[in-house]
Image (cartoon, rainbow, N blue to C red):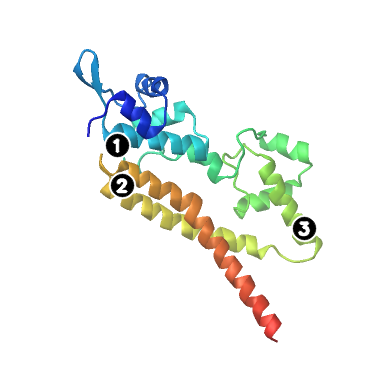
Amino acid sequence: MQYKISELVAKTNVPKSTILYYIKEGMLPEANKIKSNVHRYSDEHIERIKYINYMKENLGSSNEQLKNILQNKNQSFSSSSSMVVPLMNTLSAIPIEAKHYTKKEFISTFNINVGLLDKLLKDEILMPIDHDDFTEKEVSIIQLVHYYNQVGIEYDILKMYVFHAKALSMIEYQIQTQLCDIRNEENFSVLWKIVFETLFNVKTYIFNRQTYKAFFSTLKQEVLT
């Protein structure tokens, strides 16, 4: 369908000035210029605006990140990291305002045991975004390992988390390649919804509910006995 700018504003709840800015920055395609002063917009404009809103509101993506994604959206999901770039901090649970440290600074600032740090890195329990980029998120995991050591038990559950996380990541990659195989201009807006809702909504829902189910089942058995 073709829409006037006023209709596009009404359907997306995005101001005209913002829409024109997105077009200027290459985040939205140019309008169809029927006459010099008559412009029409399409369903693609609506879907892209929905995508932009979703990424900004849910993932804190910047205009520059989104510009890069949208200008490369026809590249393969599996051969381009552009779709994933805005997700990295979110996937890693690193706040945007987090302070970053080199490995040397990290060890010095938080008085980290080098031997333990290297062991956790080798076991992939610690996985900084870059080999020389640490945050307080890594400190919290090291502290947890200290708690395990205090009570005299191995942190085997963390090792099992790593094992299953690797297996799950391969399944997620397979999903990504399947989406790549069916990607086209029309279904792009559905594909990104599948990616993000799977990673940020359904995965945590299923994992947490399964944990709840296991704990509740155990508690129920204890009550009955």
Q: Are marks 3 and 2 in contact (CB under 8 Å)?
A: no
- Please tell me how crowded label 1 is: few (under 14), some (14-19), or many (20+) other residues with Cα within 10 Å: some
Question: Of helix, strand and loop, which one carries label 2?
Answer: helix
* Residue at numbered disc 2: 180
* Residue at numbered disc 3: 147
Residue drawn at the location 38% of the way across and 44% of the way down: 192
Residue drawn at the location 53% of the way across and 35% of the way down: 60
Question: Of helix, strand and loop, which one carries label 1?
Answer: loop
Above or below residue 225? Residue 10 is above
Q: Amino acid at mark 3?
A: Tyr
Q: Amino acid at mark 1?
A: Asn
In this rendering, would 196 be left or right of 218?
Answer: left
- In the displayed orientation, state which residue is furthest to the bottom: 225
On the question of residue 85 being in view, the answer is: no
- Specify the quadrant that holds the N terminus: top left
Q: Amino acid at mark 2?
A: Cys
Q: CA distance from mark 3 to mark 2?
A: 43 Å
Q: Are marks 1 and 2 in contact (CB under 8 Å)?
A: no
